[in-house]
Image: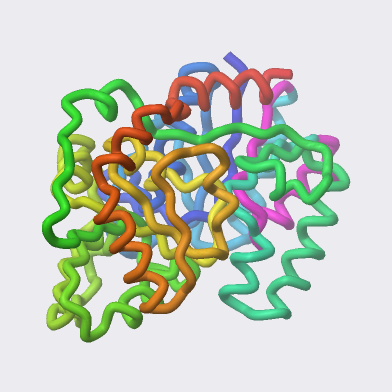
Amino acid sequence: MKRLFIISNERISNIDGKFYCDNIDLKSTPEGLDQVFNVNLLGRTSNLSRSHEIKVSNVKIFSSIFSYFFSVLKSLKYQQSKYLVISITPYTFFITILLKIFGKSPYVYLRSDGYKEYKAILGPIGVLFYSCMFNVVSLFGNLISCRKQILRNKKGHVVFPSQLDQDWFENLRRGEIEKFKLLYVGRLKIEKGIFSLLTMLKGKNIDLAIVGAEKNFKNNYEDQNVKIYFNENNKKRLIKYYDDHNIFVLPSFTEGHPMALIEALARRRPVVIFKEIQHVIDEKKGIFVSERNIESFLKTLNFIKSNYSQIIKEMELNRLPTKKDFINDMAKIISQ
């Protein structure tokens, strides 16, 4: 099998020789591609414990950009090797340039809209910063994106990421909605909008469960009917979180192809998003758009409650991508 070096900016922890990450995509994509290629995953060292074990034989993590660069240079001795760079960040930007200097044409996988992410974190200067990196990388990188719009009219491939296997479609439990029981699954980051949602719900008697906290996160929102759980890497327990709640909320300021949204739809739980990411709807049933204010949000929740049975019935028509489809598409592109 050909070697595939997957280069990521994500933090990875090493505990007794086993490697862990928080982003489920960084676990599943290398594991899936490892069935087709000899995968070597390169990432950054984390001093914090992480949730998802990465079951790939060859994982290397680095505490400095210099050691990272040196390892990439060493990989060049494998002349037939392929390179997959995940997301454009300062780290991966310079590594992509380095690979090009040495005659490689890396694939660059864009999992979300970097323009919007950098704007959410750094404001207008973030847009300019990301624009410079994106335009340079698009000149010589083979772009792969989870949405056509993210390519910004640049040439590239479009894939549909998914974690879904058959377990997600079996033993479906019909939801009930006498009382709102909201669920959010994802990282607790500013760009994910979760803190915006918590501020919005302050003083409201609405239950919210958050799944995705790091081990050192302290819950300061207990007086808001908010329960916070650590990252969940057990699929059966994660499915139960969806089944135990009746509406899923994705409050992100920016998203590409959100995994948690697909999981919620698979378990037939209606989803509320905000206008910034209404592009994720496509033709999927069961997704509702709210303004980012409490009046509009409550109006959206009450609409779902009043039409819950009909909404669930319509969601049966959804045709959702599977993990197998995604990995097959990625492998086919990289093998070209």
**Residue 143 visible in the snapshot:** yes
Can you tell which quarter of the image residue 272 is in? bottom left
Q: Is residue 45 left or right of residue 197?
A: right
Which residue is at 63% across, 65% downward? 116
- Residue lying farthest top? 1
Q: Is residue 43 above or below residue 53?
A: below
Q: Position of residue 258 (x, y in %)?
A: 47, 48
Q: Position of residue 49 (x, y in %)?
A: 28, 58
The part of the chain drawn in magenta is 80-104
Q: Is residue 11 magenta?
A: no
Foreground residue, 249 or 97?
249
Q: Is residue 87 magenta?
A: yes
Foreground residue, 135 or 73?
135
Q: Is residue 196 left or right of residue 84?
A: left
Q: Is residue 207 above or below residue 324?
A: below
Q: Position of residue 327 (x, y in %)?
A: 51, 24
Q: Position of residue 54 (x, y in %)?
A: 36, 38
**Residue 55 visible in the snapshot:** no
Total marks in image: 0
According to the image, what is the colour scheme of the structure? rainbow
Can you tell which quarter of the image residue 183 is in? bottom left
Locate the C terminus and report the quarter of the image it occupies.
Answer: top right
Locate the N terminus and report the quarter of the image it occupies.
Answer: top right
Which residue is at 19% across, 76% downward? 219
Which residue is at 57% across, 41% downward? 282
Q: Is residue 54 above or below residue 204?
A: above
